[in-house]
Amino acid sequence: MQKKAFSPYWLLVPALTVLALNTFYPVIYSVYLSFTDWNWGKTSNFVGIKNFVTVLTKAQYRGAFLNTLVFATSAVVIETCLGLGLALAINGITRGAGLIRTMLLMPLMVSGIAVSLVWKVLLDPTQGVINYFLSLIGIEGPAWLGTVPSAMPSIIMIDTWWQTAFSFIILSSALKGLPAEPFEAARLEGASAWQTFRHITLPMLKPVLITVIIFRSVDTLKVFDIIFGTTGGGPMRATEVVQTLAYQTAFKFHRFGESATISVVFSLIILVLCLAYLRLDTDEGDAS
Amino acid sequence: MKPNFLSQFGRYTVAITAAAVSFFPILWIAMIALKDRDDAFAMPPVWFFTPVWDHFVKAWSTSGFSGAFMNSVMVCVMGNLLAFAIGIPAAYLLNQRRVPGRKAILVWLLISYMLPEFLFVIPVYVLYQQIGLYDTVIGLAIIYQIFTLPFTIWLVRAFFADVPASLAEAARLEGATTWQIIWKIYVPIAAPGLAATAILNAIKMWNELTIALALTFSDAQTVTLAVAGFRGYASIDWGAMSAASIIVILPMALFAILAQRHIVQGLSLGSVK
Amino acid sequence: MATVSLRDIDISYGSTTVVKSLNMDIADGEFTVLVGPSGCGKSTILRLIAGLEERSAGDVTIDGTVVSDADPSARNVAMVFQNYALYPNMTVAENIAFGMKIRKIDPAEIKSAVTDVARTVGLTDHLSKRPGKLSGGQRQRVALARAIVRHPKVFLFDEPLSNLDAEFRASIRLELRQLHKTLKSTMIYVTHDQVEAMTKGDRIAVLAPIGVNGTHNLMQFDTPETIYRKPANLFVARFIGSPKMNTFEVETAAKGLTIAGQTISTARALPLKVVVGIRPEHIEVAEHGGDKSGLSLAAKVKVTENLGHEYLVFTDTALGPITLRIADRYDCPKDGSDLTLSLPQARLHVFDLATGGRLEIDPAP
């Protein structure tokens, strides 16, 4: 008689092989590089923790980490609030909701590079349409991406245009999935719209809200495309972030060891976020 | 309940404003791409004009652009095939509760998805140079698995979770192998979800910049890189650049229009489940 | 067509034991019902026979062959699931044919087999529909057809009627009986509904969660008559019958027991404390002029429920609350009125309070 089939672990073998090749090898190699002064040349010397000292102390590097933090925090806060507000407003709409959703979704489909080009055109100080609109209401538009004080806010604005749809879609789906009974009960008890939001909607959305914030945090920390495509980190390093720094250090100045060190330190920060997320995930008693 | 006209009016105002803000920049670029040189930056803007296609012709015939477009199509197709071929069986197994090590593998997938690109781009650059995968479409499709595979497994697993386990059990009793259960029962049932996954994967790969920038040079250049090329010209040809942007946006925008429901479902599943 | 036997079966997940020391022998062609409250392991046992569940100890034998480690597909058993488990992406015909297609049977042969079985269960007009377009009763039939078409040694049913409306349930129940008569196959049927169990089984296995006595799940395995007339223990006595059997604790004397001041002498010595039970339908009411030879007991009516063909009367007595059933030919007693009940001795069940086991009290001559 035919014996019971062995638990089909082999189904996992190809996936785990690819996953291992794609993660273990690069991580180990990068960690190794971070202790060397390799510059794509023939020699590669072991330099101990010299790279780490440089990365953690050099003002330019500290600036990039700081810029990344400013960008990520602002973008995540703005996009999450805006996404939640839009979800609350648009979920009550019956007619035309599909069309509006599609239009809102549009920016999310656009590559970071195309986003950069689009906004470079729109924000051009002299020929851009945004400053033209502003001039119509009597405001002299700034140079946007061109000056130190306005560059980072411009990048944050571009990211908001680009990615708010992500928070919106997920929060909107989550809102639709909420049970109707608590809201009906609240209405019977005469709760105001704000009270209902504060005491019923928000607590029930919390798990999804946390997921959105974590995912957006990781994504914004890794920001590269829209900076590479617009300012390239300038002016005067005002928009230089970790990933553009890692890129330039390696591919422009060929200091691969140092670049690897930046990424290793950065990965640790992201890893902590990942673990925090998983911790929250299990705390919420997630059933999946 | 009495319909609250004021609140409905408010909702529509918000919705229409948001939709306009989302859509206007793309529309504006499309207009620039279709205007002749004089109209493009005329202030006040010219809203009505006869479209000219010169910029599109020029963008498309720019050296390497059409090739890059095809490369991107190939990368999306190959990356999806690879992710599905190895991700679907894995997703099926990871959907079973009693698999030891399941949790650890799911965490590993999440970490793979979240790693910053420049951590693996340099080692892979070195490796690809040595084994001849540098500047190849297949090489790109393979390294894209670093985010495509976790995303596929994550999503497909959620779609498979909606299939009652008793279907697999019934099929087992009838003599079906695990392989047959996956491809003849689970995959057809989850087909709409798989389509959503494929679209989201394609969008991510089509739009990816960082890895493509580091691992291709000319032969395997993707369309996103080709568009980036327009940025670097000494004197920027705004018309051609806008046309190129529209060409790279268009396929994904079509996805958004045709498969809005699926994309929304895929995105929400990925983060809610 | 096969016997099924379970030998010393233990099933546990980690530290949770679900099934313990289970022994059952099911005869060829028998219709066996596994019944019990949730958590008693009835579905787990069914799935073990199918090969969908792993046992920790013991052996499963089908048709004389030990199949404990055999793949489900090698056991030649068919199962009808609670949610029917139909493949939504296939038509009714494809659903029925799936197993044969997998086995690469000749298409012409498949077609004739599908046509035959569709006629048997009355699905001929629905063969090209998908399950989503069918009613609950029709889906049930597809699930049945899929089982029948394979000519399995054993049919397994996992609460197949629980998703159906009451009216469908009665008719499918009848059809299942009919089917069993025609096919003469061994069938094992799981339900939590004791009425369904009583009406269907050749034999009934009453199962309890392992916590009930700690050593085994199987409380009694016998014909419906015996289960009803001579429940082997307090658990079975209370589980089978609706409303539940009335039970009350009684202290025993040297050679007998005293209930409401009346002594029944017994031939053998009894444990110190026993539980006496009587079913609501076996209690006579003196005022109705029935048999008055039983133990007499004064009762005050608390509340009544009118079920149409009978009344359920909830009373308070010296022994505690007692429920009885009164046929509709009598008037329904008023709330608060007094009744004199008569408990016929032959209808009393006596159980050991300590072990819950049944005691035969053979009255002394």
Image: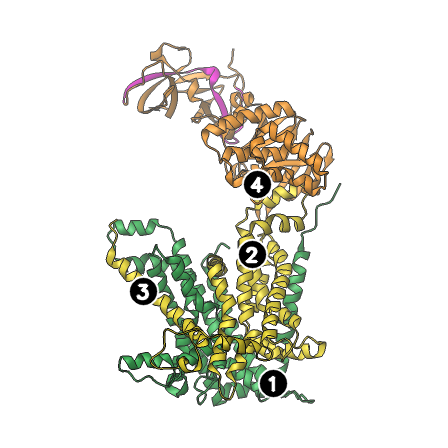
**Residue carrying label 2:** B194
**Residue carrying label 4:** C86
Q: How many marks?
A: 4
Q: Which residues are magenta?
A: C336-360
Question: Label 4 vs label 1: CA separation?
Answer: 59 Å
Q: Amino acid at mark 4?
A: Leu
Q: Which mark is residue B14?
A: 3
Q: Amino acid at mark 3?
A: Val
Q: Which chain is yellow?
A: B
Q: Colour of chain C?
A: orange
Instruction: Give x and y (percent) for residue C2.
Output: 69, 29
Element carrying mark 2: helix
- Does the residue at mark 3 contact the one at mark 4 (Cβ under 8 Å)? no
Upstream in sequence: badge 3 or badge 2: 3
Q: Amino acid at mark 1?
A: Gly
Is A49 drawn above or below residue C318 in the view shown? below
Question: Label 3 vs label 2: CA separation?
Answer: 33 Å
Question: Label 4 vs label 2: CA separation?
Answer: 21 Å
- Does the residue at mark 3 contact the one at mark 2 (Cβ under 8 Å)? no
Element carrying mark 4: loop
Same chain for marks 3 and 2? Answer: yes
A96 magenta-colored: no
Element carrying mark 3: helix
Between label 1 and label 3, give the one nearer the viewer: 3
Q: Residues within 10 Å of mark 2 (few under 14, many from 20)?
A: many
User: Is residue C260 visible from the viewing direction of this image?
Assistant: no
